[in-house]
Amino acid sequence: MASPGEEALPDPAALERIFNHVATQRLILRRLQIGDGPAMFAVHGDPATNLYNPSGPHPDLATSEEMLRSCLHHWEVYGFGYWAVMLPLEEHVIGFGGVEHRVWRERDVFNLYYRFTPSAWGQGYASEMARMAVSLVRAYLPRWPVIARTRAGNIASLRTAERVGLIRRPDLDTEHIVLALGWTPAGDQPN
């Protein structure tokens, strides 16, 4: 088995063609752009969206722009990453989410992420976006498991992960509740 981070993925350019701009029934999921810093701050700087985040909301635009640079770098390296989420025919971003590669517990995984502005809550948008992200990863990058980590009190996040097929894994819990899809014992390869 390759060391974490060493296992080869498909060509990033090929993945970018798949992940770059995706439409669901109600959403546009597009690759992040350098100008998304203010939208990222509007979502990640909002105390309501960070109720369960121990780091709290982003304190300023510079913090959100640093996160954006990190996310853009991930896109450059891997050809996929977190999306800006928009409604068709609208200009503003209502949230961010998707999957990024992480090494967690010394294993390569896809971290499933979703954070939306409070005005978008309760519409099923996070589940719709997450379902697409999981579907694309399972179709094009099936080798690594998908995980979502959340706090016990974050019922909406737990339900979103469960709705898209992730299963609660108490054996993986630490300070977070962990939900996973495709997690096998170390050394085993998923089918």
Image: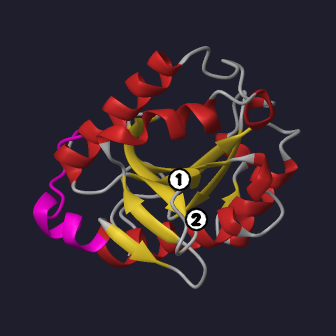
Relative depth, front residue between 69 and 154: 69
Say above or below: 87 vs 7: below
Snapshot quadrant of residue 66: top left
Per the model, the C-alpha gap separating discs 2 and 1 is 7 Å
Measured from the top left, where is residue 7 in percent x and y?
A: 19, 50
Give the left or right position of residue 6, taking residue 132 as reference: left
Snapshot quadrant of residue 181: bottom right
- The residue at the point 74 percent across, 37 percent down is 49
User: In this figure, which residue is indicated by the disc labeled 2?
Assistant: 130
User: In this figure, which residue is indicated by the disc labeled 1?
Assistant: 97
Magenta stretch holds residue 111: no
Kindly identify the amino acid type of the residue bearing the numbered disc 1. Answer: Gly
Task: Classify mark 1: residues with Cα within 10 Å, few (<14), some (14-19) or many (20+).
Answer: many
Residue 61 visible, this angle:
yes
Relative depth, front residue between 128 and 179: 128
- The residue at the point 35 percent across, 63 percent down is 189
Say above or below: 89 vs 170: below
Give the magenta range.
3-18
Measured from the top left, where is residue 69 in percent x and y?
A: 32, 30
Kindly identify the amino acid type of the residue bearing the numbered disc 2. Answer: Ala
